[in-house]
Image: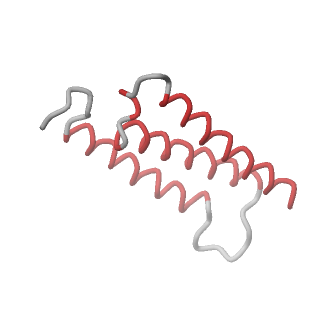
Amino acid sequence: MHYKSYPGPRTLFVVWLTLMALTVATMIAGKVTAVATVGLAWMVVLMAVTWAKSILILRYYLDLKAASGGWNKVFGVLVSLILIVVLALYAAAG
């Protein structure tokens, strides 16, 4: 069974490679090898990378870009709001 809206193997491979590069960016922004805490500027970078990864997964692997009724936008906004709340809580704690 083949769906016309579902991305092909080549597209999914390119998205996967992008996700792997963003994972490396997450490791750098999160300073996984450091003992110190992450500063606010690095936390903003970390949240931006996390947002990009989640949007790619939602659009390509869950195929929300082809969903009707604005589901793609709704989930994008929800992910954004969650990350903004996490960032605000981090900033308030530090």
- Closer to the camera in the image, 4 or 90: 4
Q: Residue at x 20, y 31 (%)?
A: 3
Task: Decide if residue 94 is on the left or right side of residue 60.
Answer: right
Q: Nearer the viewer, residue 86 or 21?
A: 86
Residue 30 sits in quarter = bottom right
Residue 80 in view in this figure: yes
**In this picture, is 67 found above or below 31?**
above
Compared with 86, 93 (above or below) is: below
Where is residue 38 drawn, in percent x and y? 72, 63
Farthest left residue in view: 1
Task: Locate residue 94: give its quadrant.
Answer: bottom right
34 or 71, nearer to the observer: 71
Of 24 and 13, nearer the camera is: 13
Residue shown at 56% from the left, 60% from the top: 28
Q: Position of residue 6 (x, y in %)?
A: 26, 33
- Residue at 26% x, 37% y: name it: 11
Tell me, what colour scheme is on the image?
Answer: secondary structure
